[in-house]
């Protein structure tokens, strides 16, 4: 393998978590004439009661807007929807006149690598940890400002970032962390060079492993150990790589990696902790092996055939697939094997979505952005691109209530118990006030700075550009 290819693949998991402070927005500030957005130099905004008046509601479930109503948030929950008597307004309550705008749930990205989004490959390889950590925190804040209030991290040591966000020191989305990507020797997720071999069973000495971004496991016993390590660190679900990958230096796309016994060991380990396993798999062979072992979610699935889609439908297994853009290939030299594999995966995306629709698969939306701050800014555009296969309402339902159903599969390991992805009484208050009707014009979500007028996460206002009456 050439040095250039080694540079490309080695960079994937060289980013660690960070803690950066977030904004303080008072009830008085929230009604100020000037635009208010997250500021990194202040604590998290105080949690107060918020009353949205005169808003049309996209509830995340129904494909039509509900009639104009008021929505009351108290603490981090939605407590009332309907006509609310202003005489009942509490002292210090933030009152936002929606003016007929659309109130909808915060968006959810089900395939995100929170710590490997912003740095380019060169920056990741040539910068110190402190600088890279600050980049990760800045990206978390931007993710929230794009209206994504929740992400499922499917590979990387994002536990520190999650803690900083949850404790209010860093603005960012809720994170459902998988922890290290668990791979076999030579599988997708093994970014060592051949000079790093041999490895003694049970030992992890490569930098990505020590940093907690990847974990190598070559026997059922090792798989159990690596699964338990991630659960001990706080993983809400477990991520394995059941087949070859695009960025992998040693695993062609056709390779099936884990044995049935190894996969079953992972499933049993996750199930004993009340959660589930999701697996990276592109090909029919890798998907079938994972499903037969009891895996409940497949990541990607771009190269599946009709029989594989039927199997997913019969077994009620989730498909977490991404509308991958051409820009992702820019991370690799055009004459590289990685570029060729990426081209093959992209070519299968359209058929995979068609099969998902034909067999009514439980389908989740995610983006899988790596090494591109510019592409990350198009997170909403990637969601809007689903209209190649779905109506705007179907795409938005997928990115809210449907994605939330998959998050709930983490069961006892759910770090945020409560309903997400819906505007309903009792649900967690992750809300966007949108300028216009995204069900009629989904392009509104591609311009979050101008069209997301208010952003609320966990009952706290992180952005408000609505002028007070």
Image (cartoon, rainbow, N blue to C red):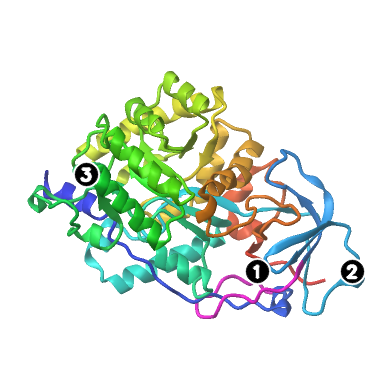
- Cα distance between the residues tagged 3 and 2: 63 Å
What is the span of residues highlighted in magenta in the rendered image? 34-50
Q: Nearer the viewer, residue 17 or 376?
A: 17
- Cα distance between the residues tagged 1 and 3: 47 Å
Mark linked to residue 218: 3
Residue 185 appears in the rendering: yes
Q: Nearer the viewer, residue 270 or 399?
A: 270
Q: Give whichever of discs 1 and 3 has the lower sequence position.
A: 3
Q: Which residue, given by chain and number where applicable, does mark 2 sit on?
A: 86
Secondary structure at numbered mark 3: loop
Mark linked to residue 461: 1
Q: Position of residue 377 (x, y in %)?
A: 47, 55
Q: Position of residue 316 (x, y in %)?
A: 52, 31
- Cα distance between the residues tagged 1 and 2: 20 Å
Which residue shows up at 50% across the image and 55% down it? 413
Main secondary structure found in the magenta portion: loop
Residue 98 lies in what quarter of the image?
bottom right
> Would residue 283 appear left or right of 448 to someone viewing this image?
left
Please say whether residue 99 is one of the residues in the magenta stretch: no
Which residue shows up at 41% across the image and 64% down it? 159
Q: Give whichever of discs 1 and 2 has the lower sequence position.
A: 2
For the N terminus, the image quarter is top left
Residue 327 appears in the rendering: no
Assess disc 1: are there few (<14), some (14-19) or many (≥20) residues with their C-alpha within 10 Å of its C-alpha: many
Identify whether 410 is placed above or below 349: below
Assess disc 3: are there few (<14), some (14-19) or many (≥20) residues with their C-alpha within 10 Å of its C-alpha: some
Identify whether 168 is placed above or below 423: below
């Amino acid at each position: 393998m050439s040095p250039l290819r080694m540079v490309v693949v080695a960079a994937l998991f060289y980013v660690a978590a960070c803690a950066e402070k977030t904004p303080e927005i008072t009830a008085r500030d929230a009604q100020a004439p000037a635009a208010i957005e997250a500021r990194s130099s202040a604590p998290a905004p105080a949690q107060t009661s918020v009353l949205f008046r005169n808003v049309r509601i996209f509830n995340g479930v129904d494909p039509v807007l509900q009639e104009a109503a008021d929505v009351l948030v108290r603490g981090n929950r939605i407590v009332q929807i309907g006509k609310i008597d202003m005489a009942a307004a509490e002292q210090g309550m933030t009152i936002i006149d929606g003016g007929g705008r659309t109130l909808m749930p915060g968006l959810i990205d089900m395939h995100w690598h929170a710590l490997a989004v912003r740095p380019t490959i060169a920056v990741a390889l040539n910068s110190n940890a402190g600088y890279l950590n600050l980049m990760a925190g800045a990206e978390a804040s931007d993710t929230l400002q794009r209206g994504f209030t929740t992400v499922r991290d499917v590979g990387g040591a994002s536990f520190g970032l999650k803690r900083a966000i949850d404790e209010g020191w860093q603005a960012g989305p809720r994170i459902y962390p998988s922890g290290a990507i668990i791979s076999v020797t030579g599988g997708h997720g093994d970014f060592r060079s051949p000079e790093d071999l041999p490895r003694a069973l049970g030992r992890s000495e490569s930098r990505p492993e020590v940093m907690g971004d990847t974990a190598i496991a070559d026997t059922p016993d090792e798989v159990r150990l690596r699964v338990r390590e991630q659960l001990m660190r706080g993983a809400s679900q477990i991520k394995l790589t059941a087949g070859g990958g695009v960025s992998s230096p040693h695993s062609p796309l056709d390779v099936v990696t884990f044995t049935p016994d190894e996969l079953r060991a992972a499933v049993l380990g996750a199930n004993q902790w009340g959660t589930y396993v999701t697996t990276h798999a592109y090909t029919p062979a890798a998907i079938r092996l994972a499903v037969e072992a009891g895996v409940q979610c497949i990541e990607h699935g771009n190269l599946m055939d009709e029989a594989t889609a039927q199997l997913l439908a019969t077994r009620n297994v989730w498909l977490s697939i991404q509308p991958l853009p051409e820009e992702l290939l820019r991370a690799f030299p055009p004459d590289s094997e990685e570029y060729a594999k990426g081209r093959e995966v992209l070519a299968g995306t359209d058929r995979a979505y068609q099969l998902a629709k034909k067999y009514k698969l439980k389908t989740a939306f995610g983006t899988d952005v790596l090494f591109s701050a510019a592409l990350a800014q198009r997170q909403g555009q990637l969601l809007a691109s689903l209209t190649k296969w779905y109506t705007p309402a179907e795409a938005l339902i997928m990115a809210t209530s449907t994605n939330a159903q998959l998050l709930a599969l983490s069961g006892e390991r759910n770090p945020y118990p409560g309903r997400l992805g819906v505007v309903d009484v009792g649900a967690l208050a992750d809300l966007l006030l949108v300028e216009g009707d995204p069900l009629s014009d989904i392009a509104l979500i591609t311009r979050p700075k101008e069209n997301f007028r208010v952003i609320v996460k966990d009952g706290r206002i992180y952005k408000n550009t609505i002028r007070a009456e």
